[in-house]
Amino acid sequence: MPPLDALAAVRAAARQEQFLEVVSEQEARARLAAAFPPAPLGVETVPLAAALGRVLAEDIVAATDVPPFDRSVVDGFAVRAADTLTASETRPVRLALNPEVIACGHPPGLAVELGTATVIATGGMLPRGADAVVMVEQTEAVEDDAGPAILIRRPVAAGANVGGAGGDIARGETVLRARTRLTARELGMLAAVGCAEVPVFRRPRVAVLSTGDELVPPGTPLRPAGLYDSNGTIIAAAAEEAGAETMRFGIVPDDADLLAARLAEALAVADMVVLSGGTSKGAGDLCYRVATGLGRVLFHGVALKPGKPLFAAEVSGKPLIVLPGFPTSAVFTFHAFVAPMIRAFAGLAEAESERVAARLAVRLGSELGRTEYAMVSLVRGEEGLIAYPLAKGSGAVTAFSLADGFFAIPALADGVEAGASITVTLLGRGLRPPDLVVIGSHCVGLDRLIGLLAEEGVTAKVLNVGSQGGLAAARRGEADLAPMHLLDAETGRYNAPFLPPGVTLIPGWRRLQGIVFRPGDARFEGRTAEAAIATALADPNCLMVNRNAGSGTRVLIDRLLAGARPPGYLNQPKSHNAVAAAVAQERADWGVAIVPLARAYGLGFIPIAEEHYDFAVPESRLSRAPVVRFRAVLASDAGRAALRALGFEPAS
């Protein structure tokens, strides 16, 4: 669809009806269950080799015994137990050896008569007449005029060292129950009773589409204002994890006719269609309009965050679900509403979630009127688990991958206070604590060192909350390392003046901070930092990009500006990357960032100061093995070389 004229877009948006009816989460689930009963879609028979992960549709009854015959469980001699009753160390029993050796897979040809024994291997079929096996270690081989024989100095009971027929699985026994999900263990049981094919519930076929003119397939050059389609990959993989057979229909541009045609194709071959994007009410949001014309709308709008624009319809008896376009909203609503439907259609039991108690690290605000689900990362504090909210919006791709779980903020609450007790639903089963917890300011140099630690098998959790947030975490004993770069305006010193009692400093490296600008900009090219700032402040059209309050870079910027508030001052992103991107994309003319980012984005660079990027560490954690390993990597030749390659200078 061609770009809309600005005035036409405003008028179109003004004509948009509001969400037909914003329903509660419970009501949305009830409507889905009423329209699509949570039951398997059908049964099919598959070869045993293709049954991994499938769900049994019927009970499996053993048609044979396992083992199917009495067999020896040791290497030894098949005997009649009655022949050994009088055996002792002083008066051993002599048994003549039969001229046969019973090996696995070969039925015996001779019976064990009174006073005789037959050599038998582990797994060998017990011969007629024998009812026990004597271990070879408990016998002595002899040969005399009567021929070869064994001496037994200890009696054995009937059944000794014998695995009876049906001892593992008996003929007629129910081996597996219907609705069992088949893993390697169950497949082994089915093979043992001779099953070559098994009846399983048919996997639901789920068609996955992504919509939007902005979307570009991964591997394709990214055009201006374009985004790589992550939703298609995430949703298709999540559907398969839930038990579906996915059908990927790719990206559909914002064209109503084309979208309607693609949906018709998908509905013709799939049991369920899931697409993302275009569920809101702005101009250009087509999905909900096209979907509305195809069938019966179940709901459009759910009172929760993220995920309010969720749309569901019934088309020819099949669910058509339109997820929000932003990745976090799309993934969350998929797991909350779509995955349970897929599991039910596939005959799988409802997934169980593990919940843990935690304490919220910082206050988290919320919007009244909607239940909000907040993603959190968990660390272990001195008195239990601490939950750090992930400062990522619904447009973030990484929120689910970085989160340990989530918790609900009630619709009638405007937030949750720091220190409040919360219940966190874990994403996945179990919580494995990392070896090293790092909370504070982000740096690509830190990423590289964490990578070197990972090569040694040391796991780390890194939470980027800024220098001051990390320092507070170190003071509370929640972090092993708190990376920071805070400048004390009075002394001109970095980091050390801010350390609270009980927290010490590990020197890290030096990062050159400077003004970044587009090459060729005469307001900055060839000037000193002071002259460039003066020129920028004198030009009302010179737009800056700032940094967030609490960051070390923000302290440096405010010191340089000396109270001035140039255009763009309130634009306060939380990373050096965002600053460099804004300047490179001409959304701003200058900002302050570190030299590696200037190189990465092809920007000009005017040095300002060499800042100190160091690590605050609770003294009680200095002796922890992961901290000791971090210090060793930091001081190693490999670590120092990695930092220098990035443009940093390790502290001496």
Image: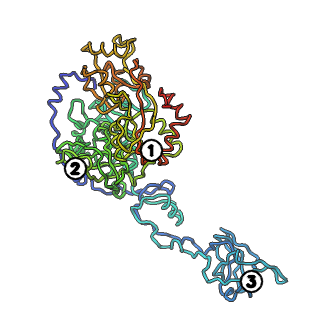
Using the numbered discs, state the Cα–Cα distance from disc 3 to disc 2 in whole angstroms.
79 Å
**Mark 2, residue position:** 25
Q: Examine the rendering and report whether any part of residue 300 can be seen.
A: no
Pointer 2 local density, CA inside 10 Å: few below 14, some 14–19, many at least 20: some
Q: CA distance from mark 2 to mark 1?
A: 36 Å
**Viewer-side label of 2, 1:** 1
Which residue corresponds to mark 1?
A: 460
* Nearer to the camera, 630 or 48: 630
The percent position of residue 608, horizontal first and vertical second, equals: 38, 21
Q: Position of residue 135 (x, y in %)?
A: 68, 75
Most extreme residue toward the right is: 145
Tell which of 202 and 388 is nearer to you.
Answer: 388
Q: Which amino acid type is marked by label 1?
A: Ala
What amino acid does circle 2 point to? Glu
Circle 3: residue type: Leu
Q: Residue furthest bottom?
A: 86
Of the residues under marks 2 and 1, which one precedes in the sequence?
A: 2
Task: Give the residue number, with chain letter if any, for mark 3.
Answer: 95
SS under mark 1: strand
